[in-house]
Image (cartoon, rainbow, N blue to C red):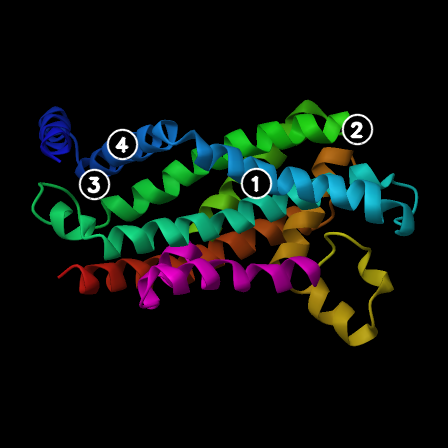
Amino acid sequence: MSTLAAALDSARARAKRHPTGALTDALVLTARLLRQVLRVPEQIVFTIVQPVLFVLLFRFVLGGAIDVGAVDYASFLMPAVFVQTVALGSALTCSGVAEDLHRGIVDRFRTLPMSHSALLVARTLADTVRNAFTLLVLALVGIAIGFRPHGSWPAWALAALLLLFVGYVFSWIGVLIALLVRSVEAAQSAGMTWVFPLIFLSSAFVPTRTMPGWLQAFSAHQPLTAIIDAVRALLLGLPAGSATSRALAWCAGILLAVVPPAVVRYRHRSS
């Protein structure tokens, strides 16, 4: 902790000429969190294993029974798995923040010369870096099982940025959940429970036209459908329509709805 205090003091001294103290604190803590991940490689391994197993099971067990039209199922599946992976990453954010709170790390940080919200920003940024690495591995696995993106390079780049932005947005939901529950165990459960219904009640794994009419209405107007449709269109070179703008609008709206109460709740719990 003394090393971290020295790093924060040094960073603050370098940033005195600029109004970026909170960002500087967040970047110092982000580097600290990433170093912690590297010291525990099991975290990286199991973060990757779960989505890879999901890809293999859906591709080779269920893929032959699902008709998605002219697109082969591997290409239909992979964009959805990318979105699912970054969305479920919010559960790791949730459990990480909960552990920080219950291990007393937040109380120690209160004694350091740092911004109140720097820890939350650092946690979400570090998990965004983790998401980027996981997505890269998943893309290689997808290509190995037949995923063939036909979009342009700019479209692929936009899809990658959208996925990372979605992961960042959803990580803030994980932060808020961690601050609302009373235990690490509850955070681990709640962090995943809310994501799965949205994933399966979307256009992720089957076309929405195969759902009952009332369920189609819900699926068409929920955020993950817009996000999945946008990523799928960008990667496969399909007409995106308004999906990309709707996905960005959903992400912006979620950030505006979640970040302020998360920061207020964090300050209340750490005061």
Residue numbers of the magenta segment: 172-201
- Tell me where residue 127 sits by quadrant: top left
Say which quadrant the N terminus sits in: top left
Is disc 4 placed on a helix, strand or loop?
helix
Q: Name the residue under label 1.
A: 163
N-terminal of the two: label 3 or label 1?
3
Identify the residue at horizontal 80%, vertical 60% (top origin): 208
Q: How far apart are marks 3 and 1 (CA)?
A: 25 Å
**Within 10 Å of the Cα at label 1, are there few (<14), some (14-19), or many (20+) other Cα atoms?**
many
Q: Looking at the rendering, in which quadrant would you find the C terminus?
A: bottom left
For residue 22, the mark is 3
Where residue 122 appears, x then y in whole percent?
A: 31, 40
* Extreme-bottom residue of the structure: 214
Front residue (pair 153, 27): 27
Q: Would residue 7 be seen by someone viewing this image from the given angle?
A: yes
Image position, residue 106 (x, y; %): 19, 51
Judge the density around disc 3: few (<14), some (14-19), many (≥20) Cα neighbours within 10 Å.
some
Q: Is the magenta stretch mostly helix, strand or loop?
A: helix
Left or right for 108, reference 65: left
CB contact under 8 Å: marks 3 and 2: no
For disc 2, the marked residue is 148
